[in-house]
Amino acid sequence: MAESIFTKIIKGEIPAHKIYEDENILAFLDIRPINPGHTLVVPKQEIDYLFDLPDNIYAGMMAVCKKIEPAIRKASGAKRVGIAVEGFAIQHAHIHLVPINSGNELDPNRAKPALDEELAAMAEKIKSFLYAK
C-alpha cells in the first residue's frame, strides 16, 4: 500500500499547519475545513482503522483531542468542538475536530478549500491559546 498523505505530512514531505505534535501524534489544520479551525488528529503510525490502533495510541489521540479542544474553541469562537471519525477517504486513522455552533455542522459536504494564509493565521491563533501560560 502506498503511503498516505498523512504519512507524507508527518515525514515533512508535504507542508501542513501543525498545531500539536508529540512522539506518537500530530494535529494539523484540514485544508478543506468544514469551519475555520477544523483540525485533524492523526497517529504517526500508519494504521487504516482507528479501532485497530494499539490502546496506548488510541488513548493518546483522545487525550490530545481533549487537550487541544479548548484552544480550538477559543481561537474559532465556536460554542463547541464536534468530533467525527469515518475514515474512508484516507486510509490512515484520523479524528476530525470541528468548531460548531449548532447541529448539523459536521456535514463534510460543507467543507471548502481554505487559503494558506487563512490556515496559517488560524494555526497561530490556536497555538497561542494552546501554549498560553
Image (cartoon, rainbow, N blue to C red):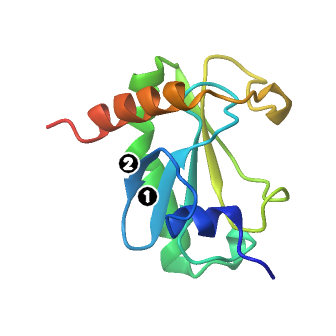
- The quadrant of the image that shows the N terminus is bottom right
- Whole-percent x and y of residue 101? 61, 17
Residue on which disc 1 sits: 63
Work out whether residue 60 or residue 5 is closer to the camera in this orientation and state it. Answer: 5
Measuring 52% from the left and 49% from the top, which residue is drawn there? 16
- Whole-percent x and y of residue 55? 55, 79
Q: Is residue 67 above or below residue 6?
A: above
Residue on which disc 2 sits: 67
Are the residues at dot 1 and dot 2 in contact (C-beta closer than 8 Å)? yes
In the picture, residue 132 is in which quadrant? Answer: top left
Q: Is residue 93 above or below residue 36?
A: below
Query: Along the horizontal axis of the image, is 62 left or right of 108?
Result: left
Query: Along the horizontal axis of the image, is 128 left or right of 20?
Result: left
Helix, strand, or loop for circle 2?
Answer: helix
Work out whether residue 120 or residue 35 is closer to the camera in this orientation and state it. Answer: 120
Work out whether residue 95 or residue 27 is closer to the camera in this orientation and state it. Answer: 27
Helix, strand, or loop for circle 1?
Answer: helix
